[in-house]
Image: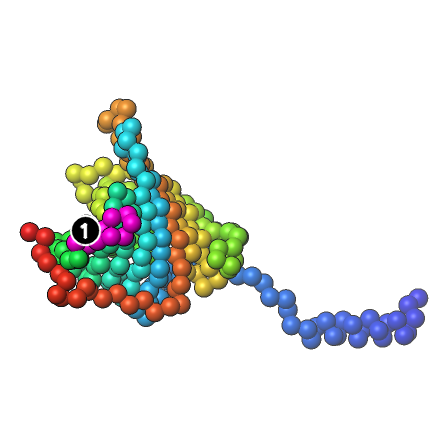
Amino acid sequence: MIDDRVMIALRIAVAASLLLPASPVEADQHFGDVRQAVLRHSAKKGGVYFSTKTREKMGSAKRTHTSAGAFRFNRSGIARSDVTYLDDARIRIITIGLQSYKRTTSLSGKPRSAKWEDFGDDGGGFTYADDMISGVNAAFLDLVELHASAGEPGGEIDGVPTTLYDGSVDVRSFATTLAGVRFRDDPNSVGGRVEWRLWAGPDDLPRRFTASIVWDMTGSPGYFESVNLTTFYKHWDTRVEIKAPPRKSVVKPW
């Protein structure tokens, strides 16, 4: 038989356990949280700094270039951008709405001209439209959400733990611009497939995004076209100011 003192001790232990708070259970990580976090950040007119490495292959030709800069958001997405592209030269492009300004310098940073070229609203190729394949474009996140994986630990990026999501999506047509590759419904363009991965921080905002974009060239045997990109996003918590160049430094390119 159980001693009375032991029975009393057991009853006290059970009663105490019932008073303790339940252990927290980690909520399932859902990709929709990333889209909502980006939308909230956009609504507050926040910004982010980024860097991208892009590898392109068209047939036997290969090309690699990098870009870095900052985005400023509004409720519709990326409203302003200040981006420097590094290829055979250093090209800096500031876009505010549909208005774009460009200045080219040598790789050493020496200006070829002190003037900025004003493309007016004809600089659509520089604009980060709402059909851009990007880790911070809410429309692209909405496109891929249905088939996105559940989140899993993605390791640390810039000292914070991340959640990794991945997936793939078929796209009816692609369009390429200096700003990047766009998905759109154009019957005159070739489509294909996008394989992607996204790492989100504790605040659900993207920290890294990769995409492998492959054109469906079944009608052109022997021809292959693809773009692979890797983007890192930093400083979501800082104020990003992007302004047009001084008026006296701006000229028309034609």
Q: Position of residue 43 (x, y in %)?
A: 31, 68
- What is the quadrant of residue 95 in the picture? bottom left
| Along the viewing direction, whichever of 76 and 108 lies nearer the viewer | 108
Q: Which residues are magenta?
A: 101-113
Label 1 belongs to which residue? Answer: 112
Visible in this render: residue 8?
A: yes
> Which residue: 19% across, 39% down?
189
> Which residue: 92% across, 71% down?
3
Magenta residues: mostly which secondary structure? Answer: loop
Q: Is residue 178 above or below residue 237?
A: above
| Along the viewing direction, whichever of 138 and 28 lies nearer the viewer | 138
Task: Say how many tags the image has.
Answer: 1
- What is the quadrant of residue 24 in the picture? bottom right
Asked if residue 118 lies left or right of residue 239, the reply is left
Secondary element at image label 1:
loop
Asked if residue 91 lies left or right of residue 50, the reply is left
Visible in this render: residue 169?
A: no
| Image quarter hosting the N terminus | bottom right
Queried whether the magenta region covers residue 40, the answer comes back as: no
Given the image, on which type of amino acid does mark 1 rest?
Answer: Arg
Q: Position of residue 194 (x, y in %)?
A: 34, 42
The residue lying furthest to the top in this view is 221
Asked if residue 119 lies left or right of residue 157, the reply is left
